[in-house]
Image (cartoon, grey):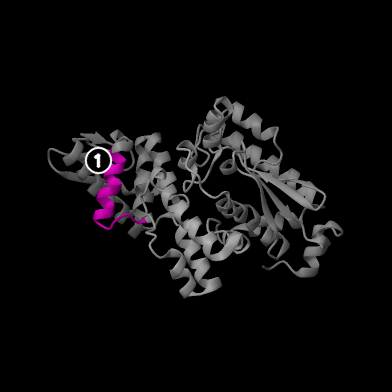
Amino acid sequence: MSNIPGCIKINWAQGRYCLDEDGFKKFSGKAIDERSLQNSIEIVKETELFLKSRYNLEDFGQVDIAGLREVMQYLREKRKNTKDNLRALLRYTQFVDNREIEIALKELLDGSDVLENLSSIVKKALGEKRRRKIFEGISLPPLGTFAIDKPKTTRRLMEKLEAELGEKQCRKMLLKAPHAPPKKVYLPERKAFQKSWNIDNFLLKHHKKYIAELEQHMKQGTLYFTQEINEDALNYVRNTPTCQNGVREGDIIYVTKIPYMAKKYLKEKNLKMKRYYYCHCSWVREAIKADAEISPDFCYCSAGFEKRPWDVIFKRSVKADVLETVLKGDLFCRFAIHIPEEYLKTKPREQLKKQGTNT
């Protein structure tokens, strides 16, 4: 008998499921409607029946990474490896407090559509004929593919992109940010910028807000994306104002990232593993550990992610560069965001008022 509070009660002897809909709705909040709730329950039932038959496990809370691989293979075979289904399993792992699998599912979801989005970007910019030529013979990994299985595809795609487009145009495609959310997500950033006296003031407030967010995760013991935050990680961010934020020097904003696994990164002495723990990208991270070379120009995808909010803030596509990256052997990734000239001379609120507040 498995009794998961607020979600599902499973009685294997009787083969019956009793759904606590109110508890599940409360946990899911407004992000899930009645139909989605029912669909979520069905995929959890199906997954647990699969685990019962294969591993004699009564609930998803007992599964490990090897078992999750089997689950993903099963869902792919049944053509049920959808984002909605993986999100349902993710919510379920949070119920049963299986943090290892919670993190793994988040990693499977994060950036899963980067190459598909890049394919669409190339098609829109260069046409279907050239897109087909570049992507010919490349099978995009299906949703549910683990990071260790991705770099070989990334390497082959970058070889074809660079051969077909050349360095400059290849970077241009990646800077269109196949991993970034829609521009509307950054409208609050634009509004916050309007209320700031200048870029430096905005960056300072933004960094303080970010530190407060991490402090809250540490206090509550919750995950910041896929990692736990401790005092060491928090101090790293406090002492690194470029981290997830940026520092202006002249007409450039320099940006770095919080390490993907900050606690391990800060303790690690081996330089290769330090680079591995820093990297956020599931499409290349495992290549670092395996000493497999992938063109560092792929990191212009990350530069595109970093420049996206500034595209919205400045109401134009800004120039961005990759200065340092773990794919080139650096111990961190650093990007340059070039500030439009008029924003160096005019207070943001005055400039934005001239341009209007809608994007």
Q: Name which quarter of the figure residue 180 lies in.
A: bottom right
Region of the chain picked out in magenta, as a range: 67-82
Depth check, front residue: 265 or 243: 265
Q: What residue lies at 65% left-to-right and 29% top-to-bottom? A: 235
Q: Is residue 283 left or right of residue 44?
A: right
Residue 326 in percent (x, y) is at 58, 41
Residue 124 in percent (x, y) is at 53, 72
Q: Secondary structure at mark 1?
A: strand
- Direction front: furthest residue: 163
The amino acid type found where label 1 is placed reads: Lys
Q: What residue lies at 70% left-to-right and 61% top-to-bottom? A: 318
Residue 19 colored in magenta in the image? no
Q: Above or below — where is 235 with respect to 354?
A: above
Q: Is residue 9 left or right of residue 296?
A: left
Say which quadrant the C terminus sits in: bottom right
Q: Which residue is mark 1?
A: 9
